[in-house]
Amino acid sequence: MVAFKSIPLYMMTSVSVDNLQGLIDTIDSFHFHIPDPPNTVASSFNEICLKSVNFSYKDKEGSTLFQVGPIDFTVKKGEVVFVIGGNGSGKSTFMKLLTGLYYPDAGELSIDGTIVTPQTYQLYREYFTTIYTDFHIFEKPYSLQNVDPAKVDKLLKLMEIDHKISFRNKKFTNMDLSTGQRKRLACIICLLEDKPIYVLDEWAADQDPKFKMYFYETFLENMRAMSKTVVAVSHDDRYFDRADRIVKMEMGKIVSL
């Protein structure tokens, strides 16, 4: 019965995404010039700190349904951190607090000792490239409008999806991909965005053994070599030794570092 009830919600979501893509196509038809974003984001950082950060999900009456925090967490440049914990432990919420997608109810977020304020949140978010579990990829990602198509083709081949999709006229030609392939495409976009911090929520979960091994043994090492920071949710305990540090969450709290 639950499955049947979820069908209208899925259909509404699908229609909403289609409508949004249609709006993007309509805007493109007017040939507006979209200026390049200002180069205001620092190319690097030393550390990001969350101090006594709390976030609560509330019902219509304002009563707390689930709370994440208080969280005290620091991540440094070039570090690879795995976040582990059971379903519903607060991992995804923690990641969205870290990246500035969610505003904390209490506590503070700082980068290199400077507290992130409502006025600087958007600038702070630009340090991150992310793949959440509920991600969506548009045919024409605006973050790739000035990218060299040959570079995209090289990465499509690396991720073994070049036989399914190509990048032409600043857009992807085919989005009919499996979940694992879509995650690989999302990873390509992350690599091309070239941000200092990669936040990946269970990226390896839908990969075959070959690409699961690639992620843990090659991708993460490449990130280290480039002094990139990676914070990744993982359930693959056989690869836990690939992390510099493991953070475990239970009931919305970090219980071990």
Image (cartoon, rainbow, N blue to C red):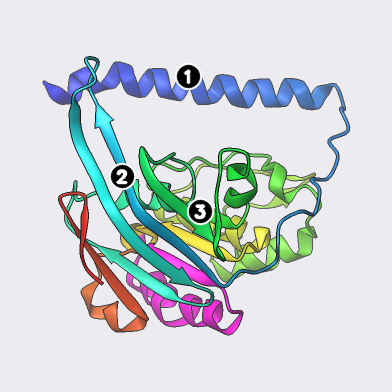
- Image coords of residue 6 (percent x, y): 24, 22
Q: Which residue is mark 1?
A: 15
Q: Count numbered badges in the picture.
A: 3
Tell me the kind of residue under disc 2.
Answer: Asn
Q: Which residues are magenta?
A: 207-232
- Residue 230 belongs to magenta span: yes
SS class of the residue under badge 1? helix
Res 173 visible: yes
- Image coords of residue 75 (percent x, y): 44, 69
- How far apart, in angstroms, are the residues tagged by discs 1 and 2? 34 Å
Q: Quadrant of the N terminus?
A: top left
Q: Callout 3: 10 Å neighbours few (<14), some, many (20+)?
A: many
Q: Quadrant of the C terminus?
A: bottom left
**In this rendering, position of residue 142 left or right of residue 8:** right
Q: Which residue is mark 2?
A: 54
Q: Which residue is mark 3?
A: 130
Q: Nearer the viewer, mark 3 or mark 1?
A: 3
Res 174 visible: no
Query: Do the residues under discs 3 and 1 have CB atoms within 8 angstroms?
Result: no
Q: Which mark is residue 137?
A: none
